[in-house]
Amino acid sequence: VSPLHRGIDTSEVEREISFRTECGLYYSYYKQMIQAASIQQGLHGLVYDNKTESVRTINILERMNVYQEVFLSILYRILPIQQYLEPVYFYIYTLFGLQAVYVIALYVTSWLLSGTWLSGLLAACWYITNRIDTTRVEFTIPLRENWALPFFAVQIAAITYLLRTHLQPVQERLTLMAVFIATFLFSLTWQFNQFMMLIQALALFILDCFDMLPTAKVMWLYIIQISGLLLVCVLQFFNSMILGSLLISFNASVLVARTIQKNLKKGGLLNRLGKLILHVLLVLCLTLLINKLIKKILNLESDEHIFKFLKAKFGFGATRDFDANLYLCEEAFGLLPLNTFSRLSDTLLFYVYIFVLFFMTVAAVIIAFWNLSGSNQVQFMEKMEECTVTLKPDAAYNLIHTILFGCLALSTMRMKYLWTSHMCVFASFGLCSTEVWKLTLKCIHLYTSQRVSTLLNTLLNWISLKSNTPNTAVFAGSMQLLAGVKLCTGRTLTNHPHYEDKHLRERTKQIYQIYAKRSPEDVYRILRSFGTDYVILEDSICYERRHSRGCRLRDLLDIANGHIMDGLGENEPDLKPSLYPRFCEEIKKNLPPYTIHFTRVFQNKTFHVYKLAKHK
């Protein structure tokens, strides 16, 4: 008998309870595939899923990056290990094994750049000793980035090797194949792949414009990025968000612009600058045109919340958009905290990194100027031998890579793991490279809560019992909580943390009216429209104090609904008082307008579960 039909083992809940928010959602599909009667039935359940979003049947393989869970579940089923190893441990050990690949890739990249294995060893040591800031795998195991970043590190190592001079044709072809495979796997395992690779494409574009990389190899890398993303698009049942990505539009624009402007790297300084400005404008206009055209043809709106978030984050006007404000008010999407640099400095990593970055950047600026000036390369090498040796193409790429991803990390804390791991590589390379020292001498520098875990454990155990809630019950609540509900109980959800869908974002905003100032009739009507049987209210959201006024979830809802926010402080002049009290507070008074629609069936110090009446 399936665990979902007989309740669940307490020990299993305790193991899985650590997979919170979206982590639990992703792991639930691995669990679903393991528990399916056959592989074919498991795949059918993912392609035609009606348990993740109530009243909707969605294709999980199209919407989410869960092929890694599918592959791992199939591997577990066909290998003779079921009697020795539980599925959850097979999953965890696989991901930890992938982190070993991550460290090896960092080791190899640093070794390739410096020419000494000591550099690679230092990079690996720094990565491990700074693991609080270089990885989240210890705390959020199934997170998509924990699957993707090892492949990204392998891709960087392969690109570093590809950019070496004097490679044999066979070596070059094999390296291109390695870059393609790593790019494909990175793209397949993380929904934010297109944005990370866009930054990578910008790095290649900058270096190519300043004649610091071989153009032919750069063009191949553009093509590989497009090919890898399109292959993922096919596997994700032609996911339209991928087709409308800026990466595809940008890379296609660069390839077209380079075909038009064949003499881009000829002429004197002013001539080259003029051509370069024209080239940048042409690429920019083509990118916007192609992207706009694709989105118009395919009627794409899945990623509009990201651009609204970016617009508001970088000061291009305030926004009342609920989805954008939801991101803006999350600490993970805020600026990188200053104490990060203090921790990185404790192991001397940050000091060495800044030292190497300064001299490498100075060398890069000088070389870029000489290249644009059209100076004779032989004379230049005679005058500035150290600089040209230091900034070989592989070193130049890693320099721009670390600068761009550093800017990303400074602006968005969640993305710091792309930067800090590469920081270990770059700092160890500079410290152990004789070429960098030649240049230097020539120029004479968790939060965990046992209380919350226990209360959540109690809640999920209560839900999982068939005597309390039927297997077909539909639950509404916060995105993060419902991911755990699906993982540990198998019940159907109204919404979930995978936010890359316009309809789901609108649905989530409607579900979150349980924390807004709305009438019980309105909330009941909204919840029943999504087939809701039970709604879970959280005191930690209803009475939230973690965020400042204006960034609490209830404040975001008030602003979106045109209502004045709670508490002392200013309100925008067009906001009006609501006619109703806050639903999540008022429902606890058990007044008749509420009890006619909602019956409390479970409560503890944090969670309150209400069953919805089924009126004819």
Image (cartoon, rainbow, N blue to C red):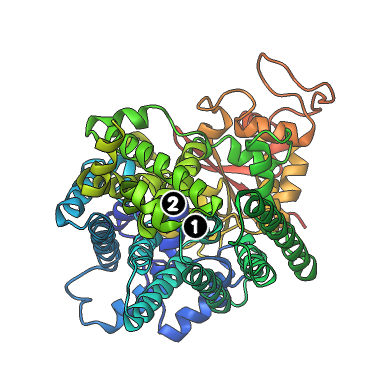
- Circle 2 residue: 401
Choose between 578 and 389: the one closer to the eye.
Answer: 389
Give the amino acid type for the residue marked by disc 1 in the picture: Gln
> What mark, if any, has residue 200 been given in the picture?
1
385 lies left or right of 202: left
In the rendered image, residue 277, in percent from the top left (x then y), is placed at 68, 51
Residue at position x 22%, y 58% in the image: 111
564 lies left or right of 210: right
Tell me the SS state at disc 1. helix
Does residue 150 show up?
Answer: yes
Residue at position x 49%, y 53% in the image: 375
Name the quadrant containing residue 126. top left
Label 2 and label 1: CA atoms lie apart by 7 Å
In the rendered view, would you say 582 is above or below 612? above
Q: Residue furthest right?
A: 574
Choose between 322 and 457: the one closer to the eye.
Answer: 322
In the rendered view, would you say 328 is above or below 269? above
